[in-house]
Image (cartoon, rainbow, N blue to C red):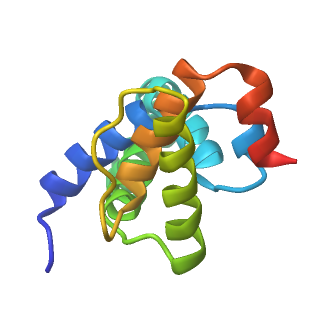
Amino acid sequence: MSQSVFSMLKDGQGYMNEWPMKKELYSYFPECRVVAATRFSIKVMPPAAVVTCAFMLHTMGVSHLPQIITIGAFFLSLPLQGLLWLGHRSNQQLPPALQHWYMEIHEKMRSHGVAVSSAESKPKYRALAKLLKSAFDNLDAAFTQRWFH
């Protein structure tokens, strides 16, 4: 099932906000690096595009306008590329090893009295993000530390 680009951008924005940015997750998931790079590019790339295009227009003139527009579009596309990747990833099903880990974390959280929604039979990365965020928010650091060592 294919999604529209706008739907994937929206999913990427939501997934970026749901993903827990914890140092323990950096070595296991590329999401941490993609989220950090995407957040950075959302802040930096629009002004960089304007400054770069203005400088190039001033130095090279209107005769190079197609190249200047292309460079500006490239700068502006970088945050969108991160959001598209995150949107696509959020809707992918977890591989079997991560499904098992998802179920294990879910069961441990339930056994420790954390209110979690029922476990999905075929969880996606977005469900894992919500579960991990809940685990880091509701369980003590010593408990979550055991999952990563």
From the top left corner, tell me how far across and down residue 67 is, in percent: 41, 57
Instruction: Pick the quarter of the image with the N terminus.
Output: bottom left
From the top left corner, tell me how far across and down residue 147 is, in percent: 75, 46
Q: Pick whichever, 148 or 107, lies toward us.
A: 107
Q: Residue at image x 61%, y 23%?
A: 139
Q: Residue at image x 80%, y 25%?
A: 142
The quadrant in which residue 135 appears is top right
Q: Residue at image x 65%, y 45%?
A: 33
The quadrant in which residue 8 appears is bottom left
Q: Residue at image x 60%, y 74%?
A: 97
Q: In this view, does 44 lie above or below 24?
A: above
* Side (left or right) of 30 relative to 109: right
From the top left corner, tell me how far across and down residue 80 is, in percent: 35, 49
* Side (left or right) of 112 relative to 131: right
Q: Pick whichever, 138 or 22, lies toward us.
A: 138
From the top left corner, tell me how far across and down residue 44 is, in percent: 52, 26
Q: In this view, does 120 lie above or below 148?
A: below
Q: In this view, does 33 lie above or below 145?
A: below
Residue 75 visible (yes or no): no
Q: Is residue 95 above or below residue 18?
A: below
Number of numbered discs: 0
Q: Pick whichever, 144 or 61, lies toward us.
A: 144
Residue 109 visible (yes or no): yes
